[in-house]
């Protein structure tokens, strides 16, 4: 199948290049290839299968829906309005009544496009501020606010006036501060740009930020960073977009990774786990105060697909009925502790970080210089694949192992995965 894929499918295919497996079936946190080999899926197929592969509880919702109504454009259905209510129930009081939902054309990238368009429409401005290490998608607008230059090379004329500023990446502090001396200069830099007449910054429409950077290497910002960004942006009437496409939908044990109920962003993007067991759906959740657009300003044939939405309804009900939020916090803490123990054994591990089941392990050539070791991460991934564990990699320097297991993983699966992970270290490092 791999050879057939190479012959027939576009060379843009990327995952099989790092993980050359041909899949047959999956259940929970386990995927099986066509030869019957089983792998622990510790990346939930790009952070999507939060409730586990082919979750039978969610599957029932999907089956029922597909017999009744599959495609309904943006006409009202009970199925859709139920999901909107479930999403809005997660927005804390008293702000909840201020928020609305717009479904987008199925991908995270399209939710990012919608968010940027809404901010531009509202403000009449065009610039966007984004962060070093960001990933927001592959469509032209979303790619413009994605920082990775390699991903953009070869594609000219993306959105104009995008400015990238430093993220709160404490392990590699862009201002070289130690924890004790940190005054959140990374967030203050936004103030400098917006207020210093010499900065050259034309007032932008929006600032877009991942509350935890995903592809950037599971980077968790310092406490207070996100709040400061909102405060500064608001003072200058810049629309604040939080991209929760990867960090949201209970990945951290809460609906959103950003959970300060007193101070919310203007627009939140959602996708991935929102379709339940892998059906495509995306949405923006936004404060009515930024609503300036009207009918037809952001449409798409497949926005709000009814089967995807049923998957979302099933996933929500499953998560609430089985108290998955608390489970994620417990399993996340366990996984993190075990990885911190592993760090004591291997000096190539420079940093271990995580919130809930959103976890990153950063590899370095030595702990003093913190020189990134992307080669080692590649080797570990191959060795783990051979032994039955698959995961995502990423990072500003491609030197981070990223664990995003399905939220239903238990201790037994985590222990098994970590045994493989540790053995792979011994095999690769010696
Ligand atoms: N934003 C973030 C934070 C993401 O992680 C991703 C996908 N990795 C996207 C946007 C784009 O989503 P999609 O691939 O569905 O277009």
Image: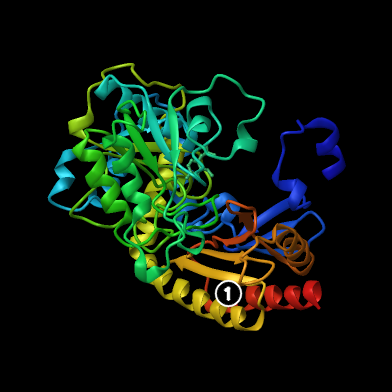
Q: Is residue 295 visible?
A: yes
Residue at 74% of width from left, 63% of height from top?
A: 376
Q: Is residue 106 above or below residue 407?
A: above
Q: Position of residue 358 (x, y in %)?
A: 48, 62
Which residue, as the protein is rendered here, is positioned at the far front?
Answer: 198
Q: Nearer the viewer, residue 192 or 287?
A: 192
- Figure quadrant of the N terminus: top right
Q: Relative to 191, is 235 on the left or the right?
A: left
Residue at 79% of width from left, 61% of height from top?
A: 36
* Residue picked out by circle 1: 414
Q: Nearer the viewer, residue 267 or 53?
A: 267
Which residue, as the protein is rendered here, is positioned at the far top?
Answer: 296
Helix, strand or loop at disc 1?
helix
**Label 1 C-beta lies within 8 Å of the nearest ligand 1 atom:** no
Q: Position of residue 208 (x, y in %)?
A: 38, 39
Q: Position of residue 375 (x, y in %)?
A: 75, 59
Q: Position of residue 50 (x, y in %)?
A: 49, 57
Q: Quadrant of residue 309?
A: top left
Q: Relative to 194, is 383 on the left or the right?
A: right
């Amino acid at each position: 199948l791999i050879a057939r894929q190479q012959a027939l499918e576009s060379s843009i295919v990327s995952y099989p290049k790092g993980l050359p497996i041909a899949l047959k079936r999956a259940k929970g946190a386990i995927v099986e290839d066509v030869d019957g080999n089983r792998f622990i899926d510790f990346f939930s197929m790009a952070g999507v299968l939060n409730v586990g592969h082919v979750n039978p509880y969610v599957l029932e919702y999907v089956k029922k829906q597909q017999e009744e109504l599959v495609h309904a454009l943006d006409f009202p259905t009970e199925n859709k309005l139920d999901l909107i209510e479930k999403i809005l129930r997660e927005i804390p009081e008293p702000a909840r009544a201020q928020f609305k939902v717009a479904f987008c054309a199925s991908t995270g990238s399209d939710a990012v496009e919608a968010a940027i368009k809404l901010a531009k429409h509202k403000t009449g401005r065009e610039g966007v501020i984004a962060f070093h290490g960001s990933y927001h998608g592959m469509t032209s607008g979303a790619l413009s606010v994605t920082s990775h230059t390699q991903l953009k090379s070869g594609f000219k004329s993306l959105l104009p006036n995008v400015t990238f500023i430093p993220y709160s990446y404490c392990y590699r502090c862009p201002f070289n501060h130690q924890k004790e001396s940190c005054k959140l200069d990374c967030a203050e830099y936004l103030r400098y740009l917006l207020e210093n007449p010499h900065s050259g910054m034309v007032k932008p429409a929006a600032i877009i930020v991942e509350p935890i950077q995903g592809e950037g290497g599971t980077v968790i910002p310092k406490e207070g960073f996100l709040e400061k960004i909102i405060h500064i942006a608001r003072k200058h009437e810049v629309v604040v977009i939080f991209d929760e496409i990867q960090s949201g939908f209970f990945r951290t044990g809460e609906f959103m990774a950003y959970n300060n109920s007193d101070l919310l962003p203007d627009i939140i993007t959602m996708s991935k786990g929102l379709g339940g067991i892998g059906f495509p759906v995306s949405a923006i959740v936004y404060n009515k105060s930024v609503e300036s657009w009207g009918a037809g300003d952001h449409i798409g044939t497949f926005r709000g697909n009814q089967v995807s939405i049923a998957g979302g309804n099933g996933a929500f009900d499953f998560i609430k009925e089985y108290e998955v939020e608390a489970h994620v916090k417990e399993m996340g803490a366990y996984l993190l502790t075990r990885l911190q123990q592993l760090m004591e054994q291997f000096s190539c591990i420079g940093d271990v970080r995580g919130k809930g089941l959103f976890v990153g392990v950063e590899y370095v050539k030595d702990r003093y210089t913190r020189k990134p070791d992307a080669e080692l991460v590649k080797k570990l991934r191959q060795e783990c694949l051979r032994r039955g564990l698959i995961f995502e990699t990423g990072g500003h320097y491609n030197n981070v192992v990223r664990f995003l297991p399905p939220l239903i993983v238990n201790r037994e699966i985590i222990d098994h995965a970590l045994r493989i992970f540790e053995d792979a270290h011994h095999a690769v490092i010696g």
